[in-house]
């Protein structure tokens, strides 16, 4: 009996010690500021998730994991590009993990699903890919480091007008950013005297572009304007070539999502000469970008960064800079106030957060696909439009 009681006492003591150790660990973990990155790590948009994760981790590697005396902990959650998953994961991140920032959102419907959670929890949600203009109006806690489709679509429309393109067919993914791109392009092209022969919309999921490409070619336009989300451009080009349309003389133009740097090399010679407007090229000649491309390739096992990576790298910068400004205070309203008007140099060039709209202000470049000296395909920038605000919001 005596022995048994002694044993029990010892066991209880051990349990108490274990519990103390556990709470000490929990205390430490609570001290870390958690950033929840919701990204498509699996499914058809997995290349975008990989860009996001690599870039966020690279930023932390380069800048350390402590800001204003607090450890930063990045939690990556795979939503497979499915909005219902993203919503559940966002909820878990803020409620269970106590995340103080949400980030990522690979598709517009995902950002839309997460918005109400950010609003309710008063947690900043940094959009690092979704590009539909209206998203930032859906929560006062949204801040965007990616882009809006009208930013690039209006600029490529002007370029088309100025370069003798008179008749265009547009082909976009049939969801909100595609509709934004189509509207911005068609209106601006028309205002400049151009004619859109037809506007085609292709389903987002498992798209078969071939019949749409054929229909576009049959109208014999001078150019085909294309918007597809990052990582789908390769399929468009493959089906374009399979139909022999690369020999049709139809010029390919679009937003730079189509000639995404991550997949551009796989498109082959058919991509040469495509002209797009966009915020980032791996060939952007700044010193900062050259260092970024080198570091990203080392971190990813050789793959090039594209705009998705750059947006996420900048998203992490925004987290760090906002926390520095608040002195480590994680109050959502203070963080959002700190982010408004923030300006810094990105691998894409100078950028800032519009204090009125929380949307990004950035340079948009016009680029042509060319083969570089290293044998790789690049979007080579040849004209710059500085400090472009979202034209859809400016028009309101
Ligand atoms: C979007 O869903 O808003 C989206 C996704 C990928 C892009 C552009 C827009 O490249």
Image (tube, grey):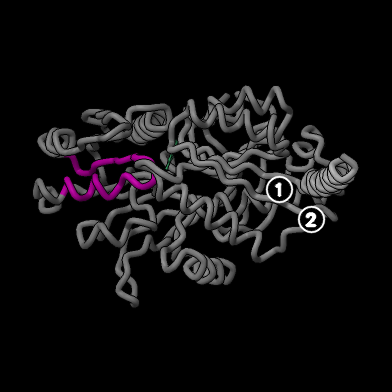
User: Which of pointers 1 and 2 lies earlier in the amino acid sequence?
Assistant: 2
Q: Which mark is residue 175?
A: none
**Residue at x 17%, y 35% (from the top left corner):** 216
Residue 77 sits in which quadrant? top right
Q: Secondary structure at mark 2?
A: strand
- Residue at left 73%, top 47%? 342
Looking at the picture, how far across and down is residue 70, in whole percent?
A: 81, 52
- Whole-percent x and y of residue 352? 66, 48
Judging by the rendered image, the residue that carries numbered circle 2 is: 67
Which of these two is toward me, 218 or 321? 321
Q: Which mark is residue 319?
A: 1
Please tell me which residue lies in front, 150 or 43: 43
Extreme residue toward the bottom, this view: 373
User: Which residue range is magenta in the image?
Assistant: 221-240
Q: Nearer the viewer, residue 311 or 100?
A: 100
Mark 1: few, some, or many residues within 10 Å (few <14, many ≥20)?
Answer: many
- Which quadrant is home to the N terminus? top right
Asked whether the residues under the numbered discs 1 and 2 touch, taking CB atoms below 8 Å apart as contact, a structural biologist would say yes
The furthest residue to the front: 1
> Whole-percent x and y of residue 343?
70, 51
Q: Secondary structure at mark 1?
A: helix
**In magenta segment, residue 153:** no
- Decide: is 350 above or below 129: below
Q: Can you tell which quarter of the image residue 186 is in?
A: top left
Answer above or below: position of 362 versus 281.
Answer: above
Q: Residue 107 at what x, y percent from top left?
A: 46, 35
Residue under the point 21% across and 30% down:
197
- Label 2 neighbour load within 10 Å: few <14, some 14-19, many 20+: some
């Amino acid at each position: 009996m005596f022995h048994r009681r002694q044993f029990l006492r010892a066991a209880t003591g051990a349990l108490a010690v274990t519990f103390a150790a556990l709470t000490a660990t929990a205390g430490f973990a609570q001290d870390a500021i958690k950033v929840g990155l919701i990204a498509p790590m699996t499914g058809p948009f997995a290349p975008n998730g990989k860009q996001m994760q690599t870039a966020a981790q690279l930023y932390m590697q380069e800048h350390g994991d402590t800001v204003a005396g607090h450890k930063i902990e990045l939690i990556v959650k795979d939503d497979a590009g499915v909005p219902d998953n993203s919503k559940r994961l966002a909820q878990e991140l803020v409620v269970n993990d106590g995340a103080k920032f949400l980030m990522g959102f690979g598709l517009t419907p995902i950002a839309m699903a997460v918005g109400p959670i950010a609003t309710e929890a008063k947690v900043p949600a940094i959009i690092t890919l979704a590009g539909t203009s209206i998203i930032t109006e859906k929560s006062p806690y949204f801040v965007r480091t990616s882009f809006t489709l009208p930013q690039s679509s209006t600029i490529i429309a002007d370029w088309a007008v100025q370069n003798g393109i008179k008749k265009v067919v547009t082909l976009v993914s049939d969801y909100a950013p595609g509709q934004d791109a189509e509207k911005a392009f068609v209106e601006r092209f028309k205002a400049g005297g151009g004619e859109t022969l037809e506007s085609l919309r292709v389903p987002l999921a498992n798209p078969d572009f071939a019949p749409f490409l054929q229909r576009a070619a049959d109208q014999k336009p001078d150019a085909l304007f294309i918007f597809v989300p990052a990582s789908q451009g390769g399929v468009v080009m493959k089906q374009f070539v399979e139909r022999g349309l690369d020999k049709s003389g139809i010029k390919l133009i679009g937003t730079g999502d189509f000639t995404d740097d991550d997949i551009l090399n796989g498109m082959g010679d058919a991509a040469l000469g495509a002209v797009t407007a966009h915020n980032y090229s791996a060939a952007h000649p700044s010193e900062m970008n050259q260092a970024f491309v080198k570091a990203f390739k080392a971190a990813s096992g050789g793959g090039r960064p594209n705009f998705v990576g750059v947006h996420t790298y900048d998203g992490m910068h925004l987290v760090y800079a906002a926390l520095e400004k608040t002195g480590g205070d994680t109050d959502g309203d203070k963080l959002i106030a700190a982010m408004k008007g923030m300006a810094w140099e990105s691998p894409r060039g100078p950028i800032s957060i519009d204090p009125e709209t929380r949307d990004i202000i950035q340079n948009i470049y016009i680029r042509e696909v060319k083969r570089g000296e290293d044998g790789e395909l690049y979007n080579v920038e040849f004209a710059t439009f500085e400090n472009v605000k979202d034209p859809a919001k400016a028009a309101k």
